[in-house]
Image (cartoon, rainbow, N blue to C red):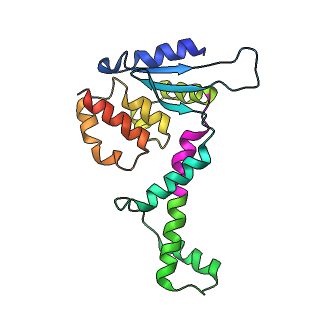
Amino acid sequence: MSWSKLKQQLESFLCPALQGKVEYRATGYRYLPDKAGLCYIAVDKKNVLHMSDKTTSIKWYQTEQEIKSDPDIRIPISEEEIEAVRKETKGTVPEDRLRVIARNRKMAEYAKELLLAQAALSKSNFSGVATKFLSTSIEESMESNDILLNILALVDRRVGKKRILNMAEKMKGKHPIVQYFYELRLRTL
């Protein structure tokens, strides 16, 4: 599907309050076929989600540090994860320290997952996710771990006021950009 047709279909699904406010933009390079196009979502003419960012490793570290320092984020650690750390250290680490090591590893994984879902998206990846969004149910898109699917579903007109209000608790564990679009949608209610 061509970009213009895909963009037109996506924008036709925008909730009425966000039409003209949220835009899907893309650049292409006609004479550089090996260079991937860039894609971004703009709100009020400002680029909010830029896909294909070169500063990914720096952002990953910042996100990991934010997760580690946020007291509200509670990441459960199973006994299997503690046991895996115990085996790696060959039993030389005290019990209370094993829990800290397992927790830090899990937080690092969580930070990587958050950024992995966002970092290396290009125009072709966005097109693939957008096409998937158009062919799947809105419930599937909302429950997905894919950040882009979550965003597209949040700004969709098929998601009503009651459903948006009922998602408040679920949004706390989502990526900050998904939370941004959730807040944006809340303001339109």
> Where does the N terminus fall, quadrant-wise?
top right
Q: Quadrant of residue 17?
A: top left
Task: Work out whether 169 lies above or below 30.
Answer: below
Q: Quadrant of residue 44?
A: top left
Task: Work out whether 181 lies above or below 61.
Answer: above
Task: Work out whether 55 lies above or below 92.
Answer: above
Question: Percent from the top left, x then y, of residue 85?
Answer: 58, 75
Majority SS type along the magenta span: helix
Question: Percent from the top left, x then y, of residue 16?
Answer: 31, 17
Q: Residue at x 43, y 33 (%)?
A: 151
Is residue 169 on the magenta stretch? no
User: Which range of residues does the magenta coloring cover?
Assistant: 109-122
Q: Residue at x 51, y 63 (%)?
A: 106
Q: Residue at x 40, y 31 (%)?
A: 153
Question: Percent from the top left, x then y, of residue 28?
Answer: 65, 18
Front in this rendered view, residue 183 or 3: 183
Q: Residue at x 57, y 28 (%)?
A: 126
Front in this rendered view, residue 160 or 55: 55
> Where does the C terminus fall, quadrant-wise?
top left
Task: Work out whether 85 lies above or below 137.
Answer: below
Front in this rendered view, residue 127 or 46: 46
